[in-house]
Amino acid sequence: MTLFNPLVTALARLLIFPGLLFAVPAAWFFLWVERKSVALMQERVGPPFMQPFYDFVKLLGKSTPPRPGISGLLMRAWPLIAVSAAAGAVGLLPVLPSSGGFQGDLILLLALLELPSMCIIAAGFSSRSIFGEIGSAREAALSVSYNIVFLLAIVSIAASQHTFRLEALAALPASPLQWLGVVAILVCLPAKLHINPFSLPNAEQEIYAGPMTEYAGPELAMWELSHGLEWVAGTGLVATLIAPHVTVAWLAACIFVAISFATVLALSALAAATARLAIDTSVRFYWQCTLIFAVLAISSALFMRFRS
Amino acid sequence: MKLWNRLMCYARRRSPWLFHMNSGSCNGCDIEIVAALSPRYDAEQLGVRLEGSPRHADILCVTGPVTRRAVDAVKTVYSQVLGPKAVIAIGSCPATTNVFIDSRTLDGPLDKHLPVDVFVPGCPPRPDAIIAGVARAADILAARGNNPPATAIPLAIVDEAGVPADKPSPAELQEVKP
């Protein structure tokens, strides 16, 4: 019984809430919010509510080009790995109070959050398209830059709260250091989600579609879904870090959804208001402008740790 | 299964993704395609998205009278768009070669090479007309399903030496030089 219960909770978290059953419609909803808010800011009406769902169904019904050999198998595998990693990351988020979790699940979450962008890099190179390779190289350069800041921010939060357990981090009251970390995560999210001003890897029209150039049909549908799930996971991470601790399950879920939605709105507004930066400007932005804050955050966290 | 087919039909009608191909157009029609997506006309209400890669597209929008140089490119891009797909000829040029008729540099009109589903005439056509054409093409896509277009054509014509047959010979190119 003691072994059975955590298994059931883990499965419920992965498959129902905040896992697949919640995350997939939420992914479509966030993709719609992204496009709709851009449309509203441009004084357009924008796509209908069900648009990402229609796109998904339509892509499932399209044929795919023949891909013989091992690289063809890999090309089919990358989007599936990306979707399962992003779904797993959403499933790990401690949305409901006392929902389980284990020591070090923050590290697993970070790894799962990073996997989709690894898959994008690998997908671009295995497609052997010159545009895919350019997109992958850009994604790799961007990933090296923002991940330093992203990881330092997370580690500073974890160090200030003395734990790598997500549930404990979510339950503890927010300290000023935690807010600094959350701001750093928010600065990194546009690059993680490939939205403007950091939409370099899949720069539409500029390098065709970047790593996705050779993808079509159901595989492309999986990439769209993994992008949506990344939205849910990324904004969900922010939501779990700044949400106040409540013991009522439905209230906790509502607060989680509300904060995620607000984050999506803010990021979409930023995407609509900015243009794409060049790769050297983006890399310089993360290495020169934001790294200093991340270093400050982690050094003060470590300093406070030694004093206490 | 029947429900899934109906949903698929509906989704195809509601989500036409375009790939825009210029086959020697004067840019007039190309500007109107962009205008159709702009805030004033907002084709995104119909789910229209202009895609960067032909692999992602459902509808190929071709402008221009199809110059000899562009024939192979048009055929290649058509074969890169995956089924079910539709072709829209935007402007008078791909429909009739327009004022360039009988020019030695042309190998048009477009329906000599591709099965065109919708013609949007005009020089250039208004964005409203382009949006109406896209909506018509999306209806055709939904009705067609996974069946291939009625007029099947070979996707790439290559002669025995591996040279595309429609490419002009060096002598012909010499001829058209001013």
Image (spheres, coloured by chain):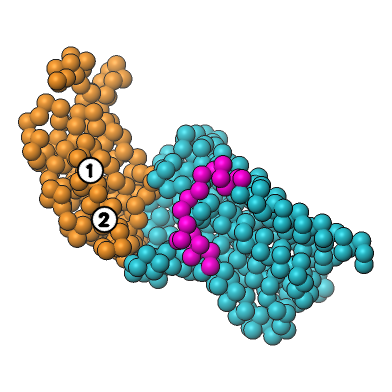
Magenta segment, which residues? A266-284
Q: From the viewer's side, name the closer residue of A142 and B88.
A: A142
Chain A tint as drawn = cyan
Is most of the magenta stretch helix, strand or loop? helix
Element on which disc 2 rests = helix
Instruction: Mark yes or no: residue A111 visible.
Output: no
Chain ID of residue with mark 1: B
Q: CA distance from mark 1 to mark 2?
A: 12 Å
Q: State the residue at coordinates (57%, 69%).
A: A263
Q: From the viewer's side, name the closer residue of B72 and A186.
A: A186
Q: Is residue A201 above or below residue A56?
A: above
Q: From the viewer's side, name the closer residue of A248 and B98.
A: B98
Q: Residues within 10 Å of mark 2 (few under 14, many from 20)?
A: some
Are the two marked residues, 1 and 2, in contact with CB atoms closer than 8 angstroms?
no
The location of residue A35, given as percent across then percent down, is 43, 63
Chain ID of residue with mark 2: B
The residue that disc 1 covers is B27
Quadrant of image for the N terminus of chain A: bottom right
Answer with mark 1 or mark 2, whichever residue precedes in sequence: 1
The residue that disc 2 covers is B35
Q: Residues within 10 Å of mark 1 (few under 14, many from 20)?
A: few
Q: Is residue B169 toward the left or the right of residue B84 in the image?
A: left
Instruction: Mark yes or no: residue A198 visible.
Output: yes
Whether callout 1 and callout 2 share a subunit is answered yes
Chain B tint as drawn = orange
Q: State the residue at coordinates (82%, 65%).
A: A160
Q: Is residue B28 toward the left or the right of residue A79 in the image?
A: left
Element on which disc 1 rests = loop
